[in-house]
């Protein structure tokens, strides 16, 4: 058994002490000399990677000092940040917001609107990574990660190429799958058997997808919410595969665990975080400079190497090798999160999933 890996938002890899290559630095702008910016990222080794390798390059390029703040990966952080922002004392100047947090913050007017002219490098990102509201641009994609199919190659032969293996009656009591209303199993099922995320526009469509998910119950040994629970079950041979984070599985394989992470032909489930700024922060110019820097090919490649995240720009724009890219991402079209639909139906989706498990 390998040592416990840190959670997804504590990151996926150790050994983050040194930066790979130096990002070319422009002149230091006098108006930013000795200025600071509080930036929150997911904690643990993920934050360590930014502190040791990414933030120093930004500081050399701009002269703006980064104060790193550890950000918990749950809704409580958004609630606390919202309350502090209303009081006019934001806890951070810039945070890494997951897609649902970005939407919730947008709905409550939490986020500051950025000036796109001050973030020209945002043009390197696909438009789906740029979030807007009546305030304009309120979120810019930071980094991505995938959930894919994993299997024990010693137990599953030949290796599958489709999510449909999860429904195969030849594998009873075999899989570990994510449970709950936020489970990506919704999107995976919709993409594999139906018309994709359009199924979540109505409650009728959601129930149709759930009916298909219900067919999985005889094959599921573990319904998990914490990735540590899934890792332990897999290492102890309680499950032979299921849904898991692609990059973490690759790290496990390097540590000697018999595991194969696979991008099914229907796609892996992509998720990403965005840079967002609380509206009460007075550091708009510094934040825009930071985001513009993080959208460069060099910064995206540095995050891939040192924080083990998937880049949000075309890989051809970076100097990542095929092997480096393949450890965290794929050129295959991904399955997208049904973020907008979940914003409308999350309570229903959660209640119905709970009902499914109890039935």
Image (tube, helix red, strand yellow):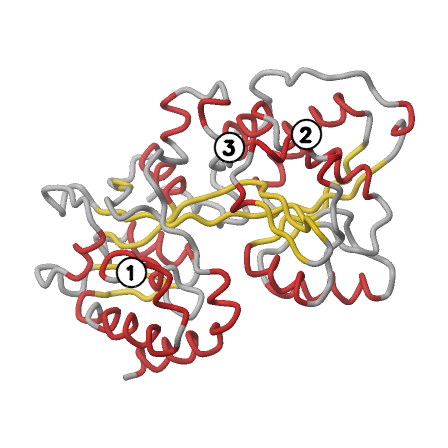
Q: Helix or strand or loop: what does disc 3 sit on?
A: loop
Residues at marks 2 and 1, CA–CA distance in whole angstroms: 38 Å
- Is disc 1 surrounded by few (<14), some (14 to 19) or many (20+) residues within 10 Å? few
Q: Quadrant of residue 41?
A: top right
Q: Is residue 121 left or right of residue 195?
A: right
- Residue beneath disc 1: 195
- Is disc 2 surrounded by few (<14), some (14 to 19) or many (20+) residues within 10 Å? many
Expressed as whole percent of the image width and height from the top left, the position of residue 83 reads 78, 67
Expressed as whole percent of the image width and height from the top left, the position of residue 17 reads 59, 26
- Residue beneath disc 2: 293
Q: Tag 1 or tag 2, which sits nearer the N-term? A: 1
- Is disc 3 surrounded by few (<14), some (14 to 19) or many (20+) residues within 10 Å? many
- Residue beneath disc 3: 313
Q: Quadrant of the C terminus?
A: bottom left
Expressed as whole percent of the image width and height from the top left, the position of residue 222 reads 29, 65
Q: Which numbered mark, 1 or 3, is in the foreground of this view?
A: 1
Expressed as whole percent of the image width and height from the top left, the position of residue 72 reads 62, 55
Q: Helix or strand or loop: what does disc 2 sit on?
A: helix
Question: Disc 3 vs disc 2: Cβ atoms closer than 8 Å?
Answer: no
Residues at marks 3 and 2, CA–CA distance in whole angstroms: 13 Å
């Amino acid at each position: 058994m390998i040592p416990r890996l840190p959670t997804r938002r504590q990151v996926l890899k150790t050994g983050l002490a040194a930066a790979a290559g130096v990002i070319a630095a422009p002149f230091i702008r006098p108006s930013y000399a000795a200025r600071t910016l509080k930036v929150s990222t997911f904690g643990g080794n993920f934050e360590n990677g930014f502190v040791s390798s990414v933030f120093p390059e930004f500081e050399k390029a701009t002269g703006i000092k980064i104060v790193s703040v550890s950000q918990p990966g749950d809704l409580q952080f958004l609630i606390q940040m919202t309350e502090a922002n209303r009081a006019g004392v934001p806890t951070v100047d810039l945070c890494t917001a997951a897609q649902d947090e970005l939407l919730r913050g947008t709905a409550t007017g939490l986020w500051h609107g950025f000036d796109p002219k001050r973030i020209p490098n945002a043009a390197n990102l696909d438009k789906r990574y740029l979030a807007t509201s009546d305030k304009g641009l309120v979120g810019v994609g930071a980094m991505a990660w995938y959930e894919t199919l994993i299997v024990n190659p010693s137990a599953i032969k030949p290796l599958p190429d489709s999510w449909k293996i999860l429904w195969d009656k030849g594998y009873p009591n075999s899989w570990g799958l994510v449970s709950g209303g936020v489970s990506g199993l919704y999107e995976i099922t919709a993409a594999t058997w139906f018309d994709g995320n359009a199924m979540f526009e109505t409650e009728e469509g959601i129930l149709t997808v759930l009916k298909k998910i219900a067919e999985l119950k005889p094959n599921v040994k573990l319904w998990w919410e914490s990735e540590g629970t899934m890792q332990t079950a897999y290492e102890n041979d309680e499950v032979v595969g299921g849904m898991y984070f692609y990059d973490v599985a690759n790290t496990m394989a390097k540590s000697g665990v018999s595991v194969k992470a696979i991008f099914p032909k229907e796609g892996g489930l992509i998720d990403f975080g965005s840079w967002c700024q609380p509206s009460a922060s007075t550091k708009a110019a510094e934040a825009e400079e930071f985001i513009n820097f993080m959208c460069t090919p060099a910064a995206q490649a540095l995050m891939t190497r040192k924080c083990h995240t998937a880049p949000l720009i075309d890989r051809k724009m970076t100097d990542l090798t095929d092997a480096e890219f393949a450890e965290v991402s794929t050129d295959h079209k991904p399955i997208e999160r049904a973020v907008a639909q979940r914003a409308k139906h999350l309570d229903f989706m959660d209640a119905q999933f709970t009902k499914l498990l109890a039935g």
